[in-house]
Amino acid sequence: TVFQLLELLVNDFMEYVPRESVPPLTASIGAFARFTGLGVNSSLTAVGFLWNVADALARYHCASSGEEGTAPEAEAPTGHFEELWVHIFMQLRALASDGRPEVRNCAVKSLSTALLSHGRKVGTACYQRCLSDILMKVVAEIQAAAQRAAAASGAGQKGDGL
């Protein structure tokens, strides 16, 4: 299946994935994670794939930013790497508001851990963008969902008392 191919690619061949293929790869992984037809375990596995892509990107970013023997023409501009990070984090952000608690919690933990683990590699401007455009919006979405749940719970309790 396609899911098994993604698993093989992400787990064994990320070092061969061209940088320009990372956004469509992460978009595909995100689509699998959001798809409810495969079940929660497949969605959780797909979130893990996003984590693997982030780790691979960290390895490539470090290798291209100062490792001896790297040809200057092989180095990617910092902005390109930052966009790749944002793309991965946006996929996790979308999953952080998933209707399934297990997927939502896994995505929030993966997003916060990825930001903490790889935050130094993205640069200050990108990190601030990730905080304001991604992490703070996740917090706002969680807060809004909690308020809706509390309001629905309160409305249900009032109806029971009549």
Image (cartoon, rainbow, N blue to C red):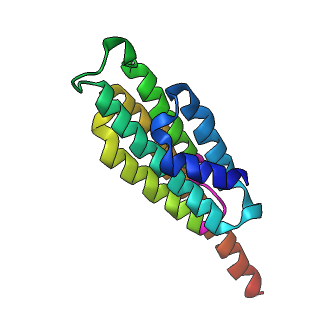
Q: Nearer the viewer, residue 22 or 106?
A: 22
Q: Does residue 146 appear in this view?
A: no
Residue for point 42% across, 31% down: 129
Q: Which image quarter is the C terminus in?
A: bottom right
Residue 100 among magenta residues: yes
Q: Which image quarter is the N terminus in?
A: bottom right
Q: Nearer the viewer, residue 124 or 35?
A: 35
Q: Is residue 141 left or right of residue 155?
A: left
Provide the residue span drawn in magenta: 93-101
Residue for point 27% across, 37% down: 120
Q: Does residue 102 appear in this view?
A: yes
Q: Nearer the viewer, residue 150 or 95?
A: 95
Q: Is residue 161 left or right of residue 137?
A: right
Disc tally is: 0
Residue 133 among magenta residues: no
Q: Is residue 83 left or right of residue 154?
A: left
